[in-house]
Image: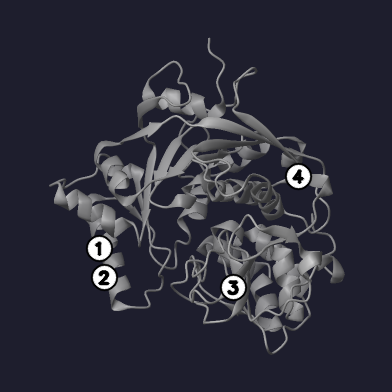
């Protein structure tokens, strides 16, 4: 029997093959297809153009409005209406505003992805779903339409880079810092069309929220997918949400890896990525003092409950200075409700931040927090390319939620280790 990586084993099983090899082209069945309010209408237009009236299996299609909700324009409302009407007509799962959130986190919460499954979505950050040991990757809208129509995807098997995370995380260091360190080491194309498989002792310290952050930012290195082999923590999370049978998969001993990258996590400190690239990570201590106009806490990278807890612990009982605005956007409505029950949202509001409804928020530069010319933003998002969050003349710095909270409190880039508070947290 050929020894294979977890990615290769999932792809082989879905292609009906005993094994696959990197570079091989396959046609594989999909377990789930996702599209949102930006990409979904384009996919539906392709179906209509080809005279396809019905998806291959309505129960395996998920439509999630998350970029422009609640609709800020008539055009956005029309796009979402198109998804809603399609879902009603065919019995497709549709998450209405107030009951949804960012697709990538929502699918995890709702048990719509499980270990060993193959999931595709019309968004590059679909790779987030690899946190539970699934193969998940983003597609263009045309390929997504093809998957909706046929239940299959055509792709090339990626070679795998093993990312070994070793050591205990220092205080205020999070999965975001691991990924910024990895990107600084290998660059934006260092994993181009590769699978990033995360292993090592540090994973035992990372909950599912943090593992999702690892897989979420795999695409920032050009990766086809990011994946964390399922362990007891994964299975406990999934079994609480998934009723259908699933088969966890792990890499075989002796599987062939293209390369291995080791991140000494115990040596890390909070990092900040400078404009205009996620690969420009530097210790926050080297950038301390830079004045900011806005702090954004949210996105599929860092809008999860763990992230909100970390930031709230530092903000509790304190006030944000008048010259800074802070926007907090929970990733899903479920996270919003839990944060409300725990008193986290009250902490943010009392500190002077604005809390928005669950959505992608300011991240894609479309809604609730767009930046103006010359403004500086510290964001917990995954990308800081020029013009990403609004004006091409704005500057975006990326960091973890602890750095975001500390920066909001001072109005300048601040090392959270210089801020007293947050005791009792894993950070």
Q: Is residue 166 left or right of residue 46?
A: right
Q: Residue at x 86, y 70 (%)?
A: 418
Asked if residue 181 lies left or right of residue 275, the reply is right
Residue shown at the point (60%, 24%) measured from the top left: 251
Which numbered disc flags the more N-terminal residue, 3 or 1? 1
Please tell me whether residue 396 is drawn above or below residue 132 in the rendered image. below
Identify the element where label 4 is drawn.
helix
Q: CA distance from mark 1 to mark 2?
A: 6 Å
Reading the chain from its start, which is encountered first: label 3 or label 4?
A: 4
Q: Which residue is mark 3?
A: 395
Query: Mark 2 sits on what residue?
Result: 78
382 lies above or below 194: below
Residues at discs 1 and 4 in contact (Cβ within 8 Å): no
User: Marks 2 and 3, how far apart in space?
Assistant: 32 Å
Give the residue at mark 4. 205
Q: CA distance from mark 2 to mark 4?
A: 44 Å
The answer to whether residue 299 is seen in the rendering is: yes
Q: Nearer the viewer, mark 2 or mark 3?
A: 3
Is disc 2 placed on a helix, strand or loop?
A: helix
In the rendered image, which quarter contains the C terminus? bottom right
Q: Is residue 230 visible?
A: no
């Amino acid at each position: 029997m050929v020894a294979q990586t977890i990615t290769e084993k999932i792809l082989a099983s879905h292609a009906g093959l005993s094994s696959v090899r990197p570079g091989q082209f396959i046609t594989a069945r999909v377990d789930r297809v996702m599209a949102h309010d930006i990409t979904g209408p384009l996919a539906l237009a392709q179906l209509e153009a080809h005279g396809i009236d019905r998806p291959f299996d309505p129960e395996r299609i998920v439509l999630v409005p998350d970029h422009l909700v609640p609709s800020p324009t008539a055009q956005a409302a029309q796009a979402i209406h198109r998804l809603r009407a399609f879902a009603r007509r065919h019995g497709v799962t549709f998450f209405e505003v107030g009951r949804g959130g960012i697709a990538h986190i929502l699918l995890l919460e709702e048990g719509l992805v499980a270990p060993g499954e193959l999931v595709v979505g019309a968004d590059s950050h679909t790779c987030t779903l690899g946190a539970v040991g699934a193969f998940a990757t983003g597609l263009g809208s045309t390929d997504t339409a093809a998957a909706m129509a046929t239940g299959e995807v055509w792709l090339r098997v990626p070679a795998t880079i093993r990312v070994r995370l070793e050591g205990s995380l220092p205080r205020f260091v999070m999965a975001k810092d691991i990924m910024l360190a990895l990107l600084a080491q290998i660059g934006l194309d260092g994993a181009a069309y590769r699978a990033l498989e995360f292993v090592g002792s540090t994973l035992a310290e990372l909950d599912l929220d943090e593992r999702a952050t690892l897989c979420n930012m795999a695409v920032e290195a050009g990766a086809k997918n990011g994946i964390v082999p399922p362990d007891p923590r994964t299975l406990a999370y999934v079994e609480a949400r998934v009723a259908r049978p699933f088969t966890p998969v792990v890499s075989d001993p002796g599987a062939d890896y293209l390369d291995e990258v080791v991140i000494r996590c115990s040596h890390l400190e909070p990092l900040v990525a400078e404009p205009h690239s996620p690969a420009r990570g530097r210790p926050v201590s080297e950038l301390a003092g830079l004045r900011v106009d806005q702090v954004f806490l949210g996105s599929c990278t860092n809008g999860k409950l763990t992230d909100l807890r970390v930031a709230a612990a530092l903000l509790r009982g304190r006030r944000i200075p008048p010259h800074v605005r802070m926007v907090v956007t929970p990733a899903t409505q479920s996270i919003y409700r839990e944060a409300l029950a725990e008193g986290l949202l009250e902490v943010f509001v009392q500190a002077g931040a604005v809390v928005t409804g669950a959505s992608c928020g300011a991240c894609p530069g479309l809604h609730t927090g767009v930046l103006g010319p010359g403004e500086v933003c510290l964001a917990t998002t995954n990308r800081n390319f020029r013009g990403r969050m609004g004006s091409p003349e704005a500057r975006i710095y990326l960091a973890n939620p602890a750095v975001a909270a500390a920066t909001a409190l001072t109005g300048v880039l601040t090392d959270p280790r210089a801020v007293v508070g947050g005791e009792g947290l894993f950070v």
